[in-house]
Image: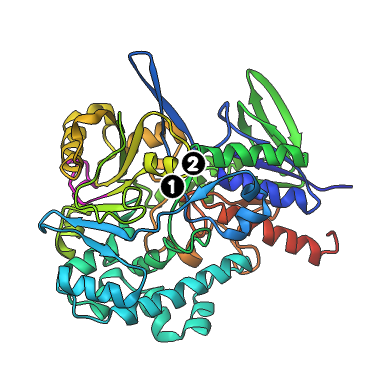
Amino acid sequence: MQERAVVVGAGINGLVAANYLQRNGFAVTLLERRSQVGGACAFDSYYLDGQRYDYPSGATVLGFMQDFVFEETGLSKQLSVCAPKHPSVVWFESKKEPCFIYDDGAELRVEVKKKWGENGDVLGYLSDFEKVRDFIINGYRNAEVPTFQSAVESLGETTASRWISGSARALMDHYFTSELMKVYCSIDVMESGPVSIDSPYSAFTIPLMSSGSIFGGKWGFVKGGLWKLTEELAEINRALGIEVITSARVLDASGGDLVTFDQNGVVKTMPYDYLIFATDPLSAAKLVKDERLIDKTQTMKAQGTSGKLVMLFRKPVIWKDSTGQEDFDLSFKFVLAVDTMDELESSTQAVVDGESDFQPGYFELYCEGAGMRKLGLDRGYESVSVFLKNLSFSKSGEQLPHVKQLVQTRILSRIENAEDLIDSILLAPKDLKERFFLPQGNIDHVELAGGQTYFQRNYSPNPESNFYQFGKSENVRYCAAGSYPCGSIAGTPGYMSAAQLIRARARAGKG
């Protein structure tokens, strides 16, 4: 008789976990609270003069996913994707011209010396970065339990201490001399929350955020919008025989082998052999009624300080400082408002207490409209998503018109045809909480801070033997963005938790 697995949450991790479990002999049911699947892979529509403009209300780009997940789930056969060939473009507001982040180490060393005065060990940094990144990716593929000791055995004590358990500031000081270079290479540390660059393990976030292998560590676009990723995976899962139940709000999961949910006002129960949560960790802890887990999740650092401004244009965006080379228009672009590590740190921490609504830090520009055109889809309008730091959790985007105007003005200063702007929509951490049930609006569900990352990013009393176990019961697991490695629309926790369960089942002679 097939063992039954119930997955709660049909975001990318729930969908990936369900896919692997179903293909390996489990009978899987997916319960999703909302009326549609996708989690943070979602879109909204803006209307003006009878015209509809669709835009990503959650994540915009794909890059943290593993190539084998893309292939093995069947997504590669259903989706068209692309990544820009042009190097990333970095504007510091204090500098007149941009710096280009070349893939080739020798070219990059020349560029950052010329533009930023960098005289440090650029090639050594890139070499060590690749070693650490490869170590992380191998751990994903093998679904290995992350431990610091395994990092030491693979990388050596010095490299593991510098890149895994060390601080981002110490890492940057070791390799670089230029403050601008240090700032640019550190911005991933506070990608979702206000993590300090002096925090232990903050160095680890830097290679972690480039550990997707679908585009070789880069980020790219999905034809039709990123939400097509989860829509297609849901259809693939249904074809595999997975039961996907939407509008299903779980009410209780504390019985040990039964989950109770409300579907459109009708209360139902469902038995399970394994229960896998792909939700935020606090909601999951409350559903299993585990007081230790509730206390743990309520005391974790979870504040999100990132938001996004979606800018809609009538015509393709024409960027200033264009090189005229292929894919310049869809290359990833950064605008940095701070010049030193101390300024980066102070702007990151300034919104924590809510006394400041916004402190300019950095802006990462995703040229989605150009990506769609590259993939052969002309929508008749253009969209640019601006990922921005640092917003407080106290107000929604609609309550921050001055922030919207300030950010919009900054970005338009880099665009030749600013007059083609239709409008922009600001989404703040408060909006992310309300739309996607993210605790305190944190896109990684909790901060990637010391005590909450790498081998500590779990909720298991026995992480060495059952890393993704959630609380006291061995048949309850957790695989969403709050677990290792983190979120960013990868499906990696979903894959790893499923792979470890499949492996344990095989050892028990059930596979």
Query: Which region is colored magenta?
Result: 349-363
Asked if the residues shown at circle 1 and circle 2 are in contact, with their CB atoms under 8 angstroms apart, the answer is yes
Please tell me which residue lies in front, 231 or 215: 215
* Secondary structure of residue under mark 2: loop
Q: Residue at x 77, y 47 (%)?
A: 273
Q: Residue at x 42, y 35 (%)?
A: 56
- Any part of residue 501 in sight: yes
Q: CA distance from mark 1 to mark 2?
A: 6 Å
Please tell me whether residue 437 is drawn above or below residue 76 in the rendered image.
Answer: above
| Residue named by callout 2 | 226
How busy is the neighbourhood of tag 1: few (under 14 within 10 Å), some, or many (20 plus)? Answer: many
Give the residue type at disc 2. Leu
Tell which residue pokes out farthest to the top in this image.
Answer: 50
Q: Residue at x 41, y 44 (%)?
A: 371
How busy is the neighbourhood of tag 2: few (under 14 within 10 Å), some, or many (20 plus)? Answer: many
Residue 285 picture location, percent across and down: 55, 44
Please tell me whether residue 183 is drawn above or below residue 24 in the rendered image.
Answer: below
Please tell me which residue lies in front, 457 or 289: 457
Q: State which quadrant residue 447 falls in.
A: bottom left
Residue 161 picture location, percent across and down: 39, 79
| Residue named by callout 1 | 61
- Please tell me the numbered disc located at residue 23: none
Asked whether residue 358 is drawn in magenta, I would say yes
Q: Does residue 98 appear to the left or right of 85 in the view shown?
A: left
Residue 264 picture location, percent across and down: 63, 19
Name the quarter where the C terminus is drawn. bottom right
Residue 25 picture location, percent across and down: 81, 51
* Secondary structure of residue under mark 1: loop
Q: State which quadrant residue 400 falls in.
A: top left
Please tell me which residue lies in front, 443 or 385: 385
